[in-house]
């Protein structure tokens, strides 16, 4: 761990202290998440966060960046992403303009033209290069989001990048990280990520929050919502995630992000508690597949029956 990273993480003496600092950033981390983040920082290892969409993986990376006082550099993965799209590219339009200007000025030497073309000012830094170049007195946080959407070749490339934090640019040389970034990878588990990449990281499974934590999260994000509405929503969503309790086997169970969105939609309609009419009108904020929408609508009365009863548990 570099001296800059040690300085930036010095205030994070224990997992409990990190949880407090994350709380200051409005992120309520449970013991497991706080401990995983603490160990990743202390050991200088990438953190691999896996869990259903909407459980707070990306938000945790953002909160860690805020705690450390560094920038968040996000690499959003997608099918077909390759190394060039993650590392760097050349600004070809500007290079062409430079070439024409040089020729107009009478520069004819090929070597001189080439050296001018491949100058650092024409380099477009993508997320991985930006993470290496960093800057400032705090380590940046590199978020590799939804790595499960990338292919095997990109995984292999990323594994090599994480092993030494260097990038070779043929025209300019090798770029090394003066301050290695804190790395967080996320996966929604749409496919299995290879063991080789996971072994390089500390692994943490992020579950959906329990009732009490979900209430705390919604209350924190939407302080204008009544306590009754917050508890009603949290109880209904908790039940909806359990097919045995809801009678609906969803394609995509709602995450805490959807709980917040649903509460916000209800709040926008003036709701002070959850009733069947407003619940039906705002289902689009909670479930995002037609089959799920129809299944929840059919079972809505049963779903809301006794809503909020978990509060006594």
Image: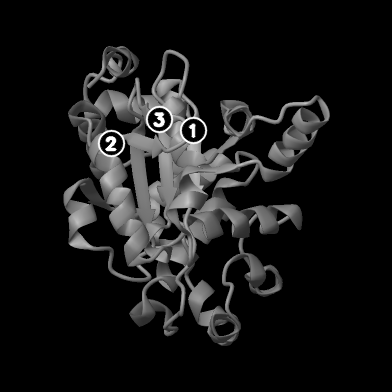
* Sequence-earlier tag: 1 or 2: 2
Q: Is residue 16 above or below residue 3?
A: below
- Residue under label 1: 130
Front position in the image: 143 or 12 = 143
Helix, strand or loop under label 3:
strand
Q: Nearer the viewer, mark 1 or mark 2?
A: 1
Residue 51 seen anywhere in this rendered image of the structure: no
- Estimate the x, y position of residue 248 in percent, counting from the top left: 45, 83
Between the residue at mark 1 and the residue at mark 2, the CA separation in whole angstroms equals 22 Å
Please state the horizontal and vertical placement of residue 163, each as a whole percent of the image. Answer: 23, 40
Q: Which residue is mark 3?
A: 173
Q: Is residue 188 left or right of residue 47?
A: right
Of residues 305 and 98, the one nearer the viewer is: 98
Quadrant for residue 294, please give it: bottom right
Q: Residue at x 37, y 37 (%)?
A: 167
Mark 3 to mark 2: distance in Å? Answer: 34 Å
| Colour scheme of the rendered structure | one colour
Name the side, left or right, on which 95 lies relative to 104.
Answer: left
Q: Secondary structure at mark 2?
A: helix
Picture coordinates of residue 150 (x, y %)? 41, 63
Q: Residue at x 55, y 47 (%)?
A: 227
Label 3: few (<14), some (14–19) or many (≥20) C-alpha neighbours in 10 Å: few
- Label 1 SS: helix
Label 1 vs label 3, nearer the camera = 3
């Amino acid at each position: 761990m570099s001296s800059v990273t040690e300085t930036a993480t010095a205030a994070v003496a224990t997992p409990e202290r990190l949880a407090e600092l994350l709380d200051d950033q409005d992120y309520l981390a449970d013991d497991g998440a706080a401990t995983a983040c603490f160990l990743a920082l202390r050991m200088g290892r990438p953190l691999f966060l896996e869990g259903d969409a909407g459980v707070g993986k990306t938000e945790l990376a953002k909160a860690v960046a805020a705690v450390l006082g560094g920038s968040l550099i996000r690499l959003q993965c997608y099918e077909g992403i390759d190394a060039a799209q993650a590392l760097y590219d050349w600004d070809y339009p500007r290079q062409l303009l430079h070439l024409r200007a040089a020729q107009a000025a009478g520069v004819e030497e090929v070597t001189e033209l080439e050296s001018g073309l491949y100058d650092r000012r024409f380099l477009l830094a993508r997320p991985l290069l930006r993470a290496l170049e960093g800057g400032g007195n705090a380590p940046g946080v590199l978020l590799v989001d939804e790595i499960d959407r990338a292919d095997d070749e990109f995984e292999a490339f990323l594994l090599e990048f994480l092993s030494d934090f260097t990038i070779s640019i043929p025209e300019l040389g090798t770029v090394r990280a003066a301050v290695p970034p804190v790395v967080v990878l996320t996966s929604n588990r749409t496919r299995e990520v290879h063991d080789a990449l996971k072994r390089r990281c500390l692994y943490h499974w992020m579950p959906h929050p329990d009732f009490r934590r979900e209430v705390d999260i919604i209350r924190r994000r939407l302080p204008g919502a009544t306590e009754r509405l917050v508890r009603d929503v949290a109880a209904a969503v908790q039940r909806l995630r359990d097919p045995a309790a809801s009678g609906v086997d969803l394609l995509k169970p709602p995450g805490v992000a959807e709980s917040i969105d649903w509460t916000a939609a209800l709040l926008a309609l003036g709701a002070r508690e959850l009733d069947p009419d407003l619940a039906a009108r705002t289902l689009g904020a909670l479930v995002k597949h037609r089959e799920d929408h129809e299944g929840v609508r059919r079972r809505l009365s049963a779903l809301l029956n006794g809503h909020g009863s978990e509060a006594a548990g």
